[in-house]
Image (cartoon, grey):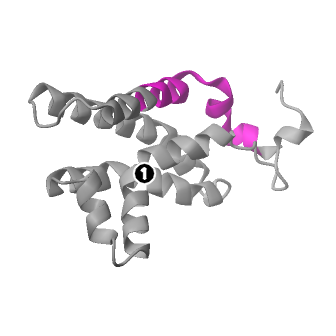
Amino acid sequence: MSSYTPDDYDAKGQLKLPPAFWGVMLLQARTWLLFVMAGASREQGTALLELFYPDTRAFWTGIALGVPAAIGLLLTGYRQRLPRLWQAWRWVLCLSLTVMLAVQFASLWQGEEALSPLMILFTGFDLLALAWFSFSTRLRDCFTPALNAG
């Protein structure tokens, strides 16, 4: 009853994750990505972190909010071994996006963060990612163990 072709499945018989999935995961784990880049450039690492996160509280909030995406990236390799966890993880990612948006709106509302083009861009991307995770049939099917049997 699937509308997918054999090319839509990988060698393990799993429905291939859309390329945008990887982009959304990196978007959600952006603080982790920046942290790794700062660690790789030892001399400029501190300056890089201070440029994007002058407030250390915002940095640690970003690290905490990026944990579900970082775990989600790791879970992609265990889709067959942990099918129930993988299936539930779609909702964990939706919840983390919702919390991320709530934190962004709360910091704007309280005046803690200035409205910048970068913040508008990230908020817009987060909204699009939440809509995609909520309504994309292809993405939902990638998280459904029964459809990942090929």
Q: Which residue shows up at 39% across the image and 59% down it? A: 34
Horizontal relation, residue 130 to residue 45: left or right: right
Which secondary structure class fits the magenta region best? helix
**In front: 81, or 93?**
93
| Residue, disc 1 | 29
Q: Residue 108: where, in percent of width, then height?
A: 17, 29
Identify the residue at image location x=36%, y=40%.
96
The image quadrant that residue 54 belongs to is: bottom left
- Whether 68 is drawn above or below 47: the answer is above
Q: SS for tag 1?
A: loop
Quadrant (top left, top right, bottom left, bottom right) of the C terminus: top right
Q: Which quadrant holds residue 41?
A: bottom left
**Number of numbered callouts drawn:** 1
Q: Where residue 134 sits: x, y (%)?
A: 51, 25
The amino acid marked with disc number 1 is: Ala
Where residue 29 appears, as percent x and y from the top left, is: 42, 51
Which residues are the magenta region? 126-148
Horizontal arrangement in the rendering, residue 92 relative to residue 80 (left or right): left
Local crowd size for mark 1, using a 10 Å CA cut-off: few (<14), some (14–19), many (≥20): many
Based on the picture, tell me whether residue 131 belongs to the magenta stretch. Answer: yes
From this viewpoint, is residue 143 visible?
no
Tell me where residue 107 appears, x and y as whole percent. Answer: 16, 34
Can residue 129 be seen by looking at this rendering? yes
Residue drawn at x 37%, y 68% as measured from the top left: 38
In the picture, measured across the screen, residue 88 lies left or right of residue 21, that is left
